[in-house]
Amino acid sequence: MDQRPDPRLDQRPHVTQQTSAGGGATWGIAILLIVVIAAGAFFVFGGSDTAQTPATTNTESSTPAAPPADAPATPPADTATPPADTAPPPPADPASPPPAADPAPTTPAPTGGATGTPPATTTP
């Protein structure tokens, strides 16, 4: 007679994990990853709408500004007189460095009888 158990009669429960839809942590990581990617794209590419915002502002112009009509005309440059000296004056001599402070004393300062170790304490 065969004493081995029949595998078809095994009464142990079958433990399975739900892997097709993923667990809560998997969904959380996926959503967090999407949010981080979206924030990075917003940071890199900016959030401005080019349909409403012009490519250049009014202060950025490639053409030079024309003088107003009522402005006096600039006189032609006089080539007979040289231009005024606009160079700054030469710098003054640098200030002399302050005198050196006294070097550290060769003998240590008095400690008033104190030593490097605290006095011994006694308990009554």
Image (spheres, rainbow, N blue to C red):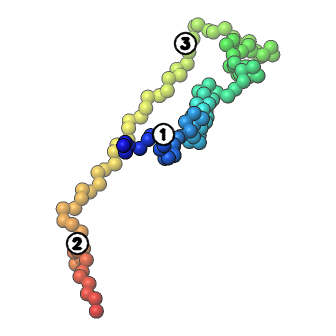
Q: Earlier in the sequence, mark 2 or mark 3?
A: 3
Q: Name the residue at 56% across, 15% down.
A: 83
Q: Quadrant of the N terminus?
A: top left
Element under label 3? loop
Residue 9: percent from the left, percent from the top?
48, 43
Task: Return the residue nearer the eye: 74 or 17.
Answer: 17
Q: Is residue 61 left or right of residue 33?
A: right
Give, as a three-letter code, the residue at label 1: Arg
- The answer to the question of whether label 3 and label 1 lie on touching residues, with beta carbons closer than 8 A, is no
Q: From the viewer's perspective, is 75 left or right of 98?
A: right
Q: Earlier in the sequence, mark 2 or mark 1?
A: 1
Q: Which residue lies under the disc numbered 3?
A: 82
Q: Which residue is identified by label 1?
A: 8
Number of other residues with Cα within 10 Å of mark 1, as a class: few under 14, some 14 to 19, many 20 or more: few
Which numbered marker is on residue 116? 2
C-alpha distance separating marks 3 and 1: 113 Å
Vertically, is 118 above or below 13? Answer: below
Residue drawn where x is 72% and y is 24% of the image? 49
